[in-house]
Amino acid sequence: MPSFFRSLTKRFFIILTMVVTGLFLLSCASWYIEPGKYWYIALLGVGFAFLLFAMGVMLIFWIVFRSKWFLLPLSAMILGWQPINAFFAFHPFAGSGSAKPEGSLRIMQWNVARFDEMSGRPRSGKSKRKLMLDYIERLNPDIICMQEFLESNDKKLFDENIPYFRDSLGYRYFYYAMDHRRPDKVYEHGIAIFSRYPIRKTHRRKFGGPKSLKANESFIYTDIDVNGRMIRVFTTHLQSLLFTNAEFRKLEEIKQGDDSTISKSLDIFQKFRQAYGFRQQQAEMIRSELDQSPHPAIICGDFNDVPNSFVYHRVKGSRKDVFTRKGFGVGRTYSFLSPTLRIDYIMVDKRFGVVQVRNPHPRLSDHFPVIADLRLPASR
């Protein structure tokens, strides 16, 4: 009887190892598979962190029991090294100080979530706007790329942000693109690039899509003259899931095993499916513009997708992800849903040198900023 039980237990763990390995490899494959067609495989990519952890547990389990089955998770993890390396940065001793190295260019990427103005009137003391502006001033970036950048059209209700960046923070050069405006025109928000260096050229391209789904966003770029060397800086905000407060509550109820889990899950999956299709199209448009850039390019943005996704892989191409080059850990940039979500990026032309990267977690927006100090390409 004991031998039968041991045999049954071993068979169970072999099957479990095979299933987890298969799911892990599919999540790795999401890097290459078009999410617009195979959204369910792309969805596995969201669970990549948990599948990777399960693979590690399986590997240790079979090693402890001195079984050759350890080769299965080990082989799968070797095959999936590229997505693993994109998910987890292995540079614990790389520089990440607050001081900007002499001669470097500091870039900041931040989805500022409308400067938290929607939590209350700006003069009521509830908004974190002033704290966010002070935080930016302390970090002192040379170029800032922001998404959900709010601009007031009624100074009695909301303070203007563009004049503050220009006149108080010293960013004389900027380009702002409005993507959304409230019907009463009290405020609007979109994407923006602010620079201490002269902007010589600007360009905007709208993605297109149903306005009812708030899919009609855009990307912009600016050609910036940094002491005689021209660089092109892009920023964008790719299609989000557009979860409402009710859908966030559904997610919490799903976690708690609510009786209506299946129907609620179907609603959530539909949001994922829709967003994957839009983001795939948007990534292709951005990649085309990046490849045509006559200057060394930097792309900053809220991609709303994880590092082992098709969108990440397509936009990145041969460029450097600054976090994987000089960061350590998973580099979380989104404060909700999962502690492993890195969806905000700075990617640079391979001619740039990455000096140091910071991924601080100030509790000011639902996103965390990414800051990179770069060495510019040598002049020709």
Image (spheres, rainbow, N blue to C red):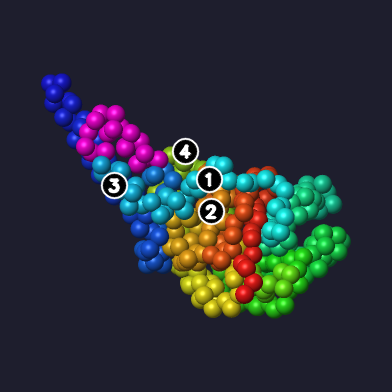
Of labels 2 and 1, earlier in sequence is 1
Q: Residues within 10 Å of mark 2 (few under 14, many from 20)?
A: some
Pointer 2 residue = 325
**Position of 201 relative to 7 (above/below):** below
> Where does the image place residue 372, in percent across and percent down from the top left?
64, 55
Q: What residue is at 83 percent from the left and 62 percent from the top?
A: 170
Q: Which amino acid does the dot numbered 3 rest on? A: Ser
Give me the disc on residue 37.
none
User: Is mark 1 in CB contact (under 8 Å) with mark 3?
Assistant: no
**Position of 130 relative to 283 (above/below):** above
Quadrant in which the N terminus is drawn: top left
- Between the residue at mark 2 and the residue at mark 1, the CA separation in whole angstroms equals 8 Å
Q: Is residue 164 left or right of residue 265?
A: right
For label 3, the SS is: helix
Q: What residue is at 59 percent from the left and 60 percent from the top?
A: 353
Pointer 4 residue = 256
Of labels 4 and 3, earlier in sequence is 3
Q: Is residue 153 left or right of residue 353?
A: right
Q: Residues within 10 Å of mark 4 (few under 14, many from 20)?
A: few
Give me the disc on residue 91.
1
Give me the disc on residue 75.
3
- Between the residue at mark 4 and the residue at mark 3, the CA separation in whole angstroms equals 35 Å
Of labels 1 and 4, earlier in sequence is 1
Q: Is residue 23 magenta?
A: no
**Which quadrant of the figure has residue 178?**
bottom right
Q: Which amino acid does the dot numbered 2 rest on? A: Arg
Quadrant in which the C terminus is drawn: bottom right
Q: What residue is at 35 percent from the left and 36 percent from the top?
A: 57
Magenta region: 53-70
